[in-house]
Image: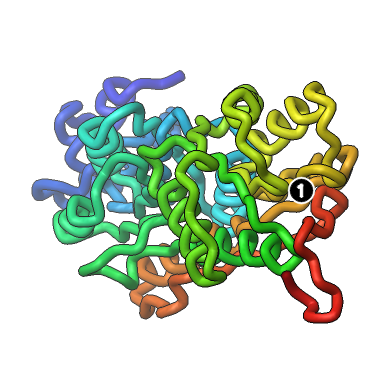
Amino acid sequence: MSTMQEVASRAGVSKATVSRVLSGKGYVSQETKDQVFRAIEETGYRPNLLARNLATSKSMCIGLVVTNTLYNGNYFSELISQAAKKLDANGRQLILVDGKNSAAEEQEAIEFLHDLRCDGIIIYPRFLSVDEMDLIIDKYKKPVMVVNRKLRKHQSHCIYCDHKGSSYQATQALIARGHRDIAFITGSMDSPTAIERLSGYKDALIAAGLTVRESLIVQGKWSPASGAAAVSALLAANHSFSAIVVSNDEMAIGAMKQLSDAGIKVPDAVSVIGFDNIPTAPFLIPALSSVKDPVSDMVSEVINQIISMLDGGYLSEKNQFTSDLILRDSVADGPFYSPDKNRA
């Protein structure tokens, strides 16, 4: 592989001159530029990516910051896969960077992508606050889009799902099927999504005139094991419930396994609804009811917005996406179901 020094020797100029030609910075006569480019062609020299980015001010890459604790599970696999495919179809590459375990580290990941001269940056935050992300958008000249968080100042720079509304819908569906004692397994409570889903559950109970029983709310950590542990805690405390809303399908699978091990049939004794509609949900026994977030649509819209900004276009006002509740065999009528009223 040829080097910059070989290009300089063939062109009869210094290495610094070759560097100026590639970066586009500093005066170099057109004649010298022609000599350098001719030497590059003759030697087969391939400038490294950073040099090319400096010269063109374009990297044809879009950065994505996702915290490593979010990598697991179908939701994020779909998000990352769809982002890569969508960008590839638009002639760009995806660069994935780990936001690690704090707001400071998420900020460092964003700065790293900025230093790489990515054409745009997508942030799926876990620790950065809304105010901090608004400041980031003010700070960087390159397009920045935020996924799964509603911003205050830069509302056109975010795409988010109505997690509160979808949890409300799932809980309301159980109430309409005759369930009164409905348990809830949260996700990790440092997650905005987990907080919103818990809020939607509570609001649905209150709207139906039911009491929010804190004893029926158990914290999970998104994993099947934590779902199983949450059910164990409910059973050990001898709490009565005829349904559970679980904040993701992974935990719902663990919850169903633990109920089965305890001799409690789903849905005959306890109905279960999860979130994310993972590919295995329809194939479980019983098939798992789940809330499907429009991940592909959200990713597609985020990238459309980034590309529109790069091309000098306008930002869309389509920010909020809604989810679909898919009822399957894991939900049955509860003890208070009244067919005459078509609700409990």
Instruction: Name the residue rendered at 49%, 39% in the picture.
Output: 215
Instruction: Name the residue rendered at 78%, 57% in the picture.
Output: 334
Q: Determine which residue is flagged by label 1.
A: 271
Q: Nearer the viewer, residue 53 or 281?
A: 281
How was this image coloured?
rainbow
Q: Quadrant of residue 18?
A: top left
Q: Is the residue 136 above or below the residue 231 in the image? A: below
In the picture, measured across the screen, residue 315 lies left or right of residue 232, that is: left
Q: Nearer the viewer, residue 5 or 255?
A: 255
Badge 1 crowding class, 10 Å Cα cut-off, few under 14, some 14 to 19, many 20 or more, is many
Q: Nearer the viewer, residue 97 or 267?
A: 267
Residue 310 spot, x, y in % from top left:
36, 66
Residue 36 spot, x, y in % from top left:
29, 39
The answer to whether residue 18 shows anywhere in this view is: no
Q: Is the residue 308 above or below the residue 258 in the image? A: below
Q: Quadrant of residue 86?
A: bottom right
In the picture, measured across the screen, residue 329 lies left or right of residue 319, that is: right
The answer to whether residue 157 shows anywhere in this view is: yes
What's the amino acid at mark 1?
A: Ser
Instruction: Name the residue rendered at 16%, 56% in the picture.
Output: 135
Residue 319 spot, x, y in % from top left:
44, 71
Q: Quadrant of residue 314?
A: bottom left
Q: Quadrant of the C terminus?
A: bottom right
Q: Secondary structure at mark 1?
A: strand
**Number of numbered discs on residues:** 1
In the picture, measured across the screen, residue 285 lies left or right of residue 182, that is: right
Instruction: Name the residue rendered at 35%, 27% in the picture.
Output: 100
